[in-house]
Image: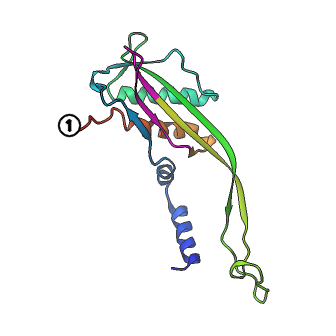
């Protein structure tokens, strides 16, 4: 398959991909670390750490708290005001940068000269803003303050007009790996 046909096939795949496919492509994995000695079955309640610093964007903060709480409740944990088994803290970061993408060379008009260009065409560079964000969620054993679980999303592209669904997807990705599977003996 030549380069042009390959590029056209890739473009067609992108254009026909559903929004769900695009979401899966953006957030493919979460990095998780856990204390292998922690008994996650013993954790029944959770609360947010007093030192939690909210995200700079109030919408992001509200969404992270909402989705984390609902996700943990869906796993059988209960939110309490005092005497929790787990204390939670999250960190979020977002950045914007310019990203350039060269586009496919185009053939010159019939009879045009082709000196100095690839296959006689021209190359155009599209520049756009890229927004990247990451989310880190930490869980501490309340009895001794030891970090027992930490999950982080990679710095993935996000759409600021879809913050709710972007945060939801990131939290679901993290909590899919909680509780960790017990180590094989």
Q: Position of residue 147 (x, y in %)?
A: 42, 24
Q: Position of residue 6 (x, y in %)?
A: 54, 73
User: Looking at the image, is 174 positioned above or below residue 98?
Assistant: above
Instruction: Identify the residue shown where x is 38% and y is 27%.
Output: 72
User: Looking at the image, is 142 positioned above or below residue 169?
Assistant: above
- Type of colouring: rainbow
| Of 163 and 84, the residue lying toward us | 84
Does the magenta portion include 163?
no
Q: Quadrant of the C terminus?
A: top left
Q: SS for tag 1?
A: loop
In this image, 91 relative to 147: left or right? right
Judged from this view, the residue extending furthest toward the bottom is: 111
Instruction: Identify the residue shown where x is 46% and y is 49%.
Output: 28
Q: Mark 1 points at which residue?
A: 185
Judged from this view, the residue extending furthest toward the top is: 82
User: Looking at the image, is 109 positioned above or below residue 42?
Assistant: below
Instruction: Identify the residue shown where x is 76% and y is 84%.
Output: 114
| Of 61 and 125, the residue lying toward us | 125
Q: For mark 1, does the 10 Å Cα neighbourhood hold few (<14), some (14 to 19), or many (20 or more) residues?
A: few
Q: Position of residue 48 (x, y in %)?
A: 47, 19
Judged from this view, the residue extending furthest toward the left is: 185
Magenta stretch bounds: 138-155
Q: In which quarter of the image is residue 133?
A: top right
Q: Quadrant of residue 115?
A: bottom right
Instruction: Identify the residue shown where x is 71% and y is 60%.
Output: 126
In this image, 77 relative to 92: left or right? left
User: Looking at the image, is 91 positioned above or below residue 3?
Assistant: above
| Of 21 and 98, the residue lying toward us | 98
In this image, 116 relative to 131: left or right? right
């Amino acid at each position: 398959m030549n380069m042009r046909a390959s590029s056209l096939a890739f473009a067609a795949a992108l254009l026909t991909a559903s929004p769900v496919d695009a979401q899966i492509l953006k957030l493919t994995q979460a990095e998780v670390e856990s204390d292998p000695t922690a008994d996650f079955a013993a954790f029944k309640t959770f609360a947010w750490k007093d030192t939690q610093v909210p995200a700079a964007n109030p919408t992001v903060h509200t969404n992270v708290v909402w989705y984390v709480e609902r996700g943990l409740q869906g796993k059988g944990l209960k939110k309490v005001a005092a005497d929790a088994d787990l204390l939670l803290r999250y960190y979020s970061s977002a950045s914007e940068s310019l990203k350039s993408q060269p586009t496919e060379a185009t053939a010159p008009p019939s009879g045009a000269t082709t000196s100095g260009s690839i296959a006689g065409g021209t190359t155009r560079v599209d520049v756009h803003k890229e927004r990247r964000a990451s989310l880190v969620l930490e869980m501490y054993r309340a009895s001794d303050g030891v970090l027992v679980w930490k999950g982080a999303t990679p710095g993935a592209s996000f759409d600021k007009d879809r913050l709710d669904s972007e945060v939801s997807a990131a939290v679901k990705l993290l909590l899919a790996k909680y509780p960790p599977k017990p180590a094989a003996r």
